[in-house]
Amino acid sequence: MRKNYNDPNLTEETINLEMARQSLIEEFQAINWYQERIEYTKDEDLKKILSHNRDEEKEHAAMLMEYIRKHDAVQNDTFLHHD
């Protein structure tokens, strides 16, 4: 769902974090889709390509998590100290 990022009621920081979180959701969805396709196919060449693509998505997710942790102190603390 495309958001209206021109909302004058939201701070730039709120908008940026929302975009990062939504992008993280989409990266995890892509990881799941690639994993399913890897398990469905019997073609080893295709498995290799899909595995590579899945792992790239994991890198993207890690980059987004770093951004979120850097810009959301509560989220960062939760990663460090959770039950």
Image (cartoon, rainbow, N blue to C red):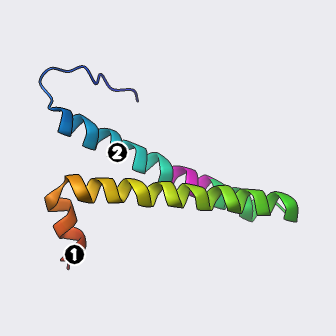
Is 30 in front, or is 66?
A: 66
Image check: 58 left or right of 18?
right
> Identity of the amino acid at label 1?
Leu
Q: Earlier in the sequence, mark 2 or mark 1?
A: 2
Q: In the rendered image, which residue does mark 1 sit on?
A: 80
Q: CA distance from mark 2 to mark 1?
A: 20 Å
Query: Which range of residues does the magenta coloring cover?
Result: 29-33
Mark 2 highlights which residue?
20
Q: Quadrant of the C terminus?
A: bottom left
Q: Quadrant of the N terminus?
A: top left
Tell me which residue sits at (33%, 39%) in the image: 19
Please state the horizontal and vertical placement of residue 53, each as a whole percent of the image. 66, 55
Q: Residue at x 38, y 53 (%)?
A: 64
Task: State the image coordinates of residue 13 (x, y, percent, origin top left).
Answer: 19, 39
In percent of width and height, residue 24 lies at 41, 50
Residue 57: mark in rendering: none
Q: x, y percentage for residue 76?
A: 21, 64
For the residue carrying disc 2, how many other residues have a C-alpha within 10 Å: few (<14), some (14-19), or many (20+)?
A: some
User: In the image, 43: left or right of 55?
Assistant: right
65 to 78, vertically: above or below? above
